[in-house]
Amino acid sequence: MACMKLGSKSDAFQRQGQAWFCTTGLPSDIVVEVEEMSFHLHKFPLLSRSGVMERLIAEVSEGDKKCVICLPKIPGGAKTFELVAKFCYGVKLELTASNVVYLRYASEQLEMTEEYGEGNLNTQTETFLNQVVLRNWKDSLKTLQTCDDIPCAEEHHVTKRCIESLTTKACTDPNLFGWPMMEHGPMQSPGGSVMWNGISTGARPKHSSSDWWYEDVSTLSLPLYKRLICTMESHGIRLEILAGSIALYAKKYLPGLNRHQGANESTSRLMAVTSGALPEEQKVLLEEIDHLLPVQKGLVPTKFLFGLLRTAMILKANPSCLANLEKRIGMQLDQATLEDLLMPNFSYSTETLYNFDCVQRILEHFLAMDQITGGSSPCSVDDGQLIGSPSLTPITTVAKLIDGYLVEVAPDVNLKLPKFQALAAAVPEYARPLDDGLYRAIDIYLKSHPWLAESDREQLCRLIDCQKLSLEACTHAAQNERLPLRIIVQVLFFEQLQLRTSIAGCFLVSDNLDGSRQLRSGLAGSTECGWTTAVRENQVLKVGMDNMRMRVSELEKECSSMRHEIEKLSGTKGSSTWGNVSKKLGFKMKSQMCSAQEGSVSNQNNGSAKIDKAKERHAKHKKNSSRDG
């Protein structure tokens, strides 16, 4: 820390209890009381430097042997007046960044100007501020910290000057210009390299990145830090740099933001932290952090925003603060993780384990923002282009995230069906390339809520698009006794439709392969290695085609059998019944391509078992219907 030495005499002051004495050999003729300290001094050194002391001494009656003067409002109290007294006596003392503001305003209050002596304290402190402190990063920061204790620091713009100095240095690249930002003294070159006789040695700074000042300014109080950030923003510093500083400041004074823990552990730890600290102060800090953070998407990590939101819920921050944080998260929900969404419910008025309503509001903010920014709609492009569209990447990520969240919260027995169904339906249909995640969540919910009525089960399962289930999901759904019969029939129907499509695609690929092999053989010549490879590939493809034809024949028989069973179940006869099955069951005739290999492997193993299971369930249903009649 830089300093300026004043005075030349040796120290002639001695403390005895709550009193200071000047040991110059002459008896003191004045007592100055500052706070609880008494200074036994002499009149002439004081009145020769201070206009206020001159007037106060003159007001004392001449008949008193010793005058007593009280100074109740000296900035810095007795410690500052001790330095003032030493300056008046010419005793050695040091001006530093820690005491210059106190001495500056003490000299102002006591009128220690050039009128009462050349090189008076007022001039010395102002010179030290301008020529030393404001040119040095650490000294400017230290001086700014002392302004908190001096209400009159604003009168002569010392606070503003320190903030402007810090802002200028923070906005300047330490690798390009001559601001001594990482220095420990005045004789430093740009970025903190040592100077010898005014010439830079070329040493590089330890930290030359744009965040080198984060830790330093985090020591400021909230009002000063807020003023510094606002000044930096007005000077055009990049918002992502400011956001990084604000995040570090919040983590330093809001415990729990930078810890990675589960939901239950997070609740207990945050409650313990806020109960031991001052919740009102932390609440004010959090709300100010929310106001300082830039609103642009992606400037602040999503995990940090979720930490702020959880802390705001615990501290019971203002509704506007909670709404702002939810909106910020909604803007970049595609960058969140499942762990972030699993926020515990801190309210005793709700019975669910996780804060389900908060996640739903966040999703609504994301969907609204996606619509404003021109997200793709299913009407603009066909299915093949829709899934691969780059503009759909965020909403597809969010759809997968919400499906995972539904899987986690589905076992909660206190989660009501309307809420679960509303969140599942909030995701647009085009955002889910596959409905496997949604099917898994609904299956877990049905398992955890066995008391649901059949109509409620059927209404919930209508959210699933059977055409968008993978073969593995279809296999599971066809044997799932928790699903309504209507859904199982739809799954079986579309599974066969997918298999037929896969077979057609396989034949097309086979024809293309044959043509390409002939072309390659014509170009490369009839070498022995090429012929051997082609023969082997043809044999493998032929075996696959034979198995596929056998499977198609079996499925046609099974389909015919199932058609008769459905006709019996519906109680109607005639050839027109099968033609109307798709309309009665609400089928959507929308094809989806699946790989031929997956179709053949999955359906060869499980096709017969699924049909038999469906037959048994139809027979049971028919038997129960006859008994009820």
Image: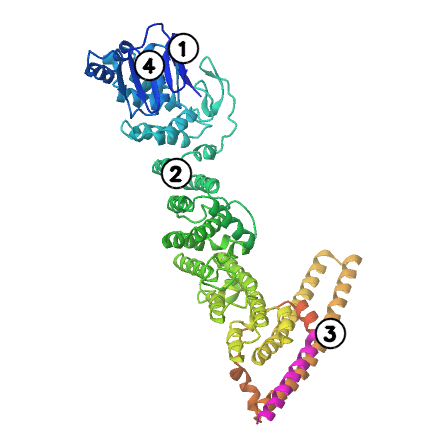
- Per the model, the C-alpha gap separating discs 1 and 3 is 106 Å
Q: Position of residue 306 (x, y in %)?
A: 48, 51
Q: Which mark is residue 222?
A: 2
The span picked out in magenta is 605-629
Say whether residue 417 is left or right of residue 153. right
Residue that numbered label 4 is attached to? 40
Q: Nearer the viewer, residue 548 or 510?
A: 548
Q: Earlier in the sequence, mark 3 or mark 4?
A: 4
Q: Quadrant of the C terminus?
A: bottom right
Q: Closer to us: mark 2 or mark 3? A: 2
Residue 5 percent coordinates (x, y): 39, 13
Q: Coloring scheme of the render? A: rainbow
- The amino acid at mark 3 is Asn
Residue for badge 1: 11
Q: Residue at position x 41%, y 39% from top?
A: 238
Residue 624 vs residue 229: left or right? right
Q: Which residue is pictured at 51% across the width and 83% down the height?
A: 583
Q: Earlier in the sequence, mark 1 or mark 3?
A: 1
The residue carrying mark 3 is 547
Residue type highlighted by circle 4: His
- 67 over 541 or under it: above or below: above
Residue 171 is situated, as x and y percent measured from the top left of the image, at: 40, 32
The image shows a total of numbered marks equal to: 4
Q: CA distance from mark 3 to mark 4?
A: 112 Å
- Name the mark nearer the viewer: 1 or 4: 4
Pointer 2 or 3: first along the chain: 2
Mark 1 vs 3: CB contact within 8 A: no
Q: Tags 4 and 2 in contact by the CB under 8 Å rule? A: no
Quadrant showing the N terminus: top left
